[in-house]
Each structure stands twice: as structure tokens, then as C-alpha cells.
Amino acid sequence: MAILSKAANRRIGQAMHAYSMLADSDRVLIAVSGGVDSLVLTWILRHWLQKAPIRYELSAVYIDNGFDSSTGDKVAEQLQNIGVPYLIEKTNFWHMAAAAEEGKSVCYHCARLRRNRLFALAQEQGFNKIGFGHHKDDILETFFINLLYAGNISTMVPKQKLFDGRTHIIRPMAYLEKKDIMEIAAAASIVPVKNSCPQDNDSKRQEARRIVAELSKLAPKVKSNIFAALANIRQEYLLDTSG
């Protein structure tokens, strides 16, 4: 079995500890898209299950939006190789989203349907944690998307409380960069499944990714400094129009 590098193992542990992501008897449902990030998260949580001082239950779910019927089979094969229980749920969310608003905001409606179903599945089956495969680069990119296009200072957080605390979203790879995830995938022989969505082209995220890459060229620690700044807010030096 592949072994995590000491550096990756340390950063995962730091994120887990800093945000108290897992506790004894947790039931964790991993949201799997078929992409490398969510598959690596599944492998990591399966790997940690063997050595953690706590016991938690793990399962994965792939919500098939109705793009390509063969995609679910490919995702199932990867999950079988990792060795976790899983559910493949077929839906017609893509068609429902395309019909909404006469085809406007298809991605928004499709994502909303998928996420609502994910939350419902977690509650129906008694999972108190939902794992997402977002990582450090995703968090930075989301910050820039919100800053540039939504006019606010915010990002996705490593742990988020939902439904009065009955459910928590956790992002155990919050301190890992994309390059770390690709190294883990190679070591664990994980083969990502191509996204079959016909509109798989988030131009805003691509632009944010380009900005982060350009800023990273300025100095070695720029990316780490921006990430650190997201937890070092000096509220008294932000604009306040409340009077």
C-alpha cells in the first residue's frame, strides 16, 4: 500500500487538529466527483482509518447528474480499488438544470441540486460529517473569485457547521497544494475519471488560478502568505460603513 510522505502526513494532521475535523464514532460521507481531488481524499481517509486513535465510519457517494451513464461505472471501479463502501446515485439533474430559467445558469442549478441531494443523503443515512476534496489552491482561488467577481472578502473554510450543527463539512486537504495531491495520486495508483459535464469550464476559477500562479512567481512565500492572511484578519483596518 502507498505511504504518505512525512510532509503531506504532517499537513493533513495539522489541518485535522486545527479544525477538530474528526471525532470518535463520526460517520463520514465523502462527496466524490471522480476527479483526482475527491478520490485522493477518499484514499487519505481510508489510510488514516488504519492508524487513527479514533474509530470512524467511512463511505463515499457519487451523484450522477445524467451526463454519461458510463462515468459512474468508472468512478465505482476507483472506489473499489481504494476499498471504501460507496453509493452511485443516478439522477436527471442535468436535464432539470437545463430546463430551469430557459437554460440560464445551468451550472448553478445543477450544482445546487447535487449539493442539496448530498445533504439529504447524509441526513437520511445518519452521516454527521461530509468530506470535500478541496485543497489549499481551491481555498486561495475561491478567495480571489469572491474578491474580484462578488465584491466580498471570503473563501471556503476547512470546517463548516450546517443545520444547527447536525452536519459538518470537512476539508482535510485544506493545507495540501495541488502538487501534493498529484503526488499522492501517483503513489496510490489513483486514476481520475474525466468530468463528463458538457460545460466543464469555470472561466472565473481559471482566471483566479492564473492570478495565484502569477503572484506565486513574485516570491517563494507569496502563496503561503496569502493563505495565512485569510486567518489573520485585522478587522479594525477594513472599511466600515456602519458609522
Image (cartoon, rainbow, N blue to C red):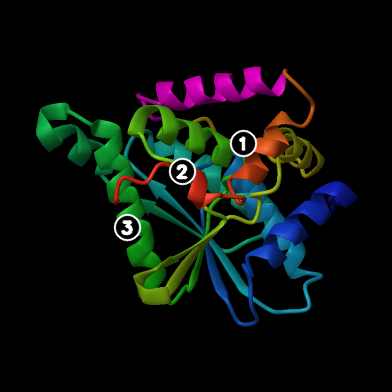
User: How far across and how far down the image is residue 88, in percent?
Assistant: 44, 54
- Nearest to viewer (mark 3 / mark 1): 1
As drawn, 13 above or below 77 = below
Q: Which mark is residue 60?
A: none
Q: Is residue 218 magenta?
A: no
Give me the residue at 74% from left, 55% from top.
12
Rounded to the nearest whole Å, what is the CA distance between mark 1 and mark 2? 24 Å
- The reply to whether the C-beta atoms of the residues labelled 3 and 1 are less than 8 Å apart is no
Which residue, as the protein is rendered here, is positioned at the far right?
Answer: 6
Q: Amino acid at mark 2?
A: Leu
Residue 44: name its quadrant.
Answer: bottom right
Give me the residue at 64% from left, 37% from top.
226
Which residue, as the protein is rendered here, is positioned at the far bottom?
Answer: 25
Is tag 3's residue or tag 1's residue first in the polypeptide sequence? 3
Q: Which mark is residue 238?
A: 2
Residue for badge 3: 117
Report the predominant secondary structure element of the magenta stretch: helix
Give me the residue at 77% from left, 52% from top.
11
**Nearer to the camera, 101 or 224:** 224
Q: Amino acid at mark 3?
A: Arg
Question: Is residue 55 found left or right of 108 in the rendered image?
Answer: right
Question: Is residue 57 found left or right of 1 in the rendered image?
Answer: left
Q: Which mark is residue 137?
A: 1
Question: Is residue 152 found left or right of 78 in the rendered image?
Answer: left
SS under mark 2: loop
**Nearer to the camera, 230 or 128:** 230
**Nearer to the camera, 74 or 127:** 127
The magenta-colored residue range is 196-217
Is tag 2's residue or tag 3's residue first in the polypeptide sequence? 3
User: How far across and how far down the image is residue 152, in percent?
Assistant: 38, 39
SS under mark 1: helix
